[in-house]
């Protein structure tokens, strides 16, 4: 299945405008550094929590570098959820110099 992708430069204005972001990393990774406003559902929990995921607008999915989020997008798109993979993931977001949140901030 082909999954649509965007990079962090395309994601930033969407997030600023209120787009929904799903972070599929593990909680420890999420606590360390995350894109502001993202909602955490670890990849392994998505099948059991799919009913929590909004279906009325595009959903941008992020992980550390893009692999897990691509898998999550495939799963979600198979269930008619308009999931878009963020290439480069949280690492690319951090490397771009954009603000991040963490448990220490």
Image (tube, grey):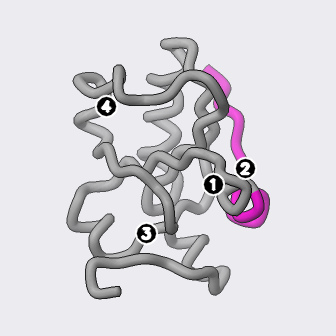
Circle nearer the N terminus (2, 3): 2
Q: Are marks 1 and 2 in contact (CB under 8 Å)?
A: yes
Does the magenta portion include 29? no
Residue 90 against residue 61 in the figure, above or below:
below
Could you tell me which residue is drawn at 21 percent across and 66 percent down?
28
Q: CA distance from mark 4 to mark 1?
A: 19 Å
Image quadrant assignment for residue 89: bottom right
Q: Is residue 60 left or right of residue 13?
A: left
Which is closer to the viewer, label 2 or label 3?
3
Q: How many marks?
A: 4
Residue 2 visible within the image: yes
Which region shows up in magenta? 1-13
Circle nearer the N terminus (2, 4): 2
Residue at mark 1:
87
Q: Secondary structure at mark 4?
A: helix
Residue at mark 4:
46
What is the x, y in percent for residue 84? 63, 38
Could you tell me which residue is drawn at 24 percent across and 37 percent down?
44
Q: CA distance from mark 2 to mark 3?
A: 17 Å
């Amino acid at each position: 299945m082909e999954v649509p992708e965007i990079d962090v430069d395309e994601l930033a204005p969407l997030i600023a405008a209120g787009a929904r972001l799903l972070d599929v990393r593990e909680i420890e990774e999420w606590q360390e550094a995350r894109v502001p406003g993202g909602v955490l559902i670890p990849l392994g929990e998505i099948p059991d929590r799919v009913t929590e995921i909004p279906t009325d607008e595009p959903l941008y999915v992020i992980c550390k570098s893009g692999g897990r989020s691509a898998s999550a997008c495939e799963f979600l798109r198979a269930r008619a959820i308009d999931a878009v993979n963020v290439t480069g993931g949280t690492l690319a977001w951090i490397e771009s110099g954009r603000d991040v949140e963490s448990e220490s901030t």
